[in-house]
Amino acid sequence: MGVLVLVGTRKGLFLLDGIDDRRDWKLAGPYLTGWSIFHAVLDPRDGTIHAATNNEVYGATVHRSTDRGESWTRADELGLPKDTGLTLEKTWHVEPGREGEDGRLWLGAAPGVLFRTDDGGSTWQAVDGIVKHETRDRWNPGAGGMCCHSIALDPDERERMYVGISAAGVFRSEDSGETFVPANKGTAADFLPEPFPELGQCVHKVLVHPARPERLWQQNHCGVYRSDDRGETWERLEENGLPSGFGFPLALDHRDPDVAFVIPEDSSENRVTPNGRLGVYRTRDRGASWELLTDGLPQRAWASVMREGFGSDRLEPPGIYFGTQSGSLFVSPDAGETWLEAAGQLPPILSVEAAEWR
Amino acid sequence: MAVVLLPSLLAAEAGGRNRFELHAATVGDALQALPVANLVFDERGRLRTLVNVYVDGVDARDRDGLDTPLAGSEEIRLVAAIAGG
């Protein structure tokens, strides 16, 4: 078993093939030159690579490749209906559907919109449950625009899914995306007059644990959170070892729902790793305590990792992967215990995803 | 036939072709016939703001824009405005 790491950068997509024990890597690319790759993912159902691609001049789209990046096809139809009064600004995240949902993928985009395709990425339909959500006039853009960046599918309950939008919050659907309800109880919005509003939270990343799907983890503008009831309520977790509750990316250990990884930043006003060092923080007790992991990472660094820039594989032990705005791709082949720089001097890294291959 | 010339990124998206010969009544019609029309126009059919169009070396805005009629021998060149980083 090997691993393919998809590294989206401001200047195209790079692929790293992991051979042997995930300590030796072969770099290929860049692909899709001229495009900023906000996110790229390999669809485990058929091996197709899908990439959310953006260009300052030519706008936002999605590309896909069935030959590991050698050739690419662009979406034929992707846009917002005229009656919404909205136009597509950026594409942010592509989420493949579940096994058995042939051809279905989801796309999160700005301004706070969700699309679905049922033909493998050729034509995308706006999802009214988000695009025409009754609370939309209460949503506001964050620094990166009003981006729908997190799409999490419940692996067991096929009707249930979640999206995260900055700064609107987390929304849950129980009907395959037809309707969505806010799921933000207990998450803070310190920048609003009401500290715990129904919505308006600046969620930075939301993930569902694959082995315990009622458990969600969230990195927010205002803290790190865990929910054990499908987002009904959230518990704030950044005491006991985290230097800051502010950060963007989040990664999980597929084996253990009590484990999560974050890479905090100093603060909203100073968006670099705290104390001039680059470290990954891991909890193994549901967020009750956090430990700093630095073995193999640079001891002095002022780094930043984007919300899509953190990923994990599903091997034993899981590999953990993150990329920096400084163009370094770090890999831990042993669930965070040790790290190595698998690639450096890349363009600013926007996204990292890992996929297993045989 | 009018000739449309594409910059490199659009040519890559058009399968490697940077030159298209087209029968079209207007500049807008010629651009809509391109396989990269959805990169040149947004979903409302508006020309993207950072795409410049030159017809025989003259900015189409100084003519009738996308409504500029074509006699059939014009050279239409698409140029990306300087933007980004």
Image: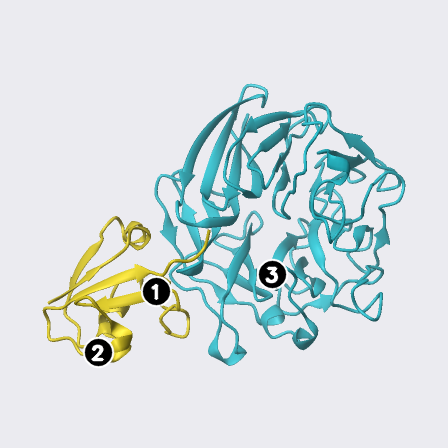
Chain colours: A cyan, B yellow
Q: Are labels 1 and 2 assigned to the same chain?
A: yes
Where residue A262 sits: x, y (%)?
Answer: 74, 41
Q: What residue is disc 3 on? A: A147
Q: Residue at x 83, y 41 (%)?
A: A242
Q: What element does badge 1 sit on?
A: strand
Question: What numbered label is drawn on residue B51?
Answer: 1
Q: What residue is disc 2 on? A: B68
Q: What element does badge 2 sit on?
A: loop
Query: How much space separates mark 1 and mark 3, taking CA atoms?
Result: 24 Å
Which quadrant is the N terminus of chain A positioned in? top right
Occupied quadrant, residue B62:
bottom left
Where residue A143 sits: x, y (%)?
Answer: 64, 60
Disc with the residue nearer the chain's start (1 vs 2): 1
Which residue type does callout 3 highlight?
Answer: Cys
Up/down of A99 relative to B23, above or below:
above
Image mark 2: chain: B
Residue A177 visible in rendering: yes
- Locate residue B45 relative to residue A181 in the image: left or right: left
Image mark 3: chain: A
Where residue A236 sits: x, y (%)?
Answer: 85, 51
Which residue type does callout 2 highlight?
Answer: Thr
- Locate residue A300 relative to residue B6 in the image: left or right: right
Which residue type does callout 1 highlight?
Answer: Val
- Locate residue A329 relative to residue A36 in the image: left or right: right
Q: Residue at x 65, y 53 (%)?
A: A152
Occupied quadrant, residue A173:
bottom right
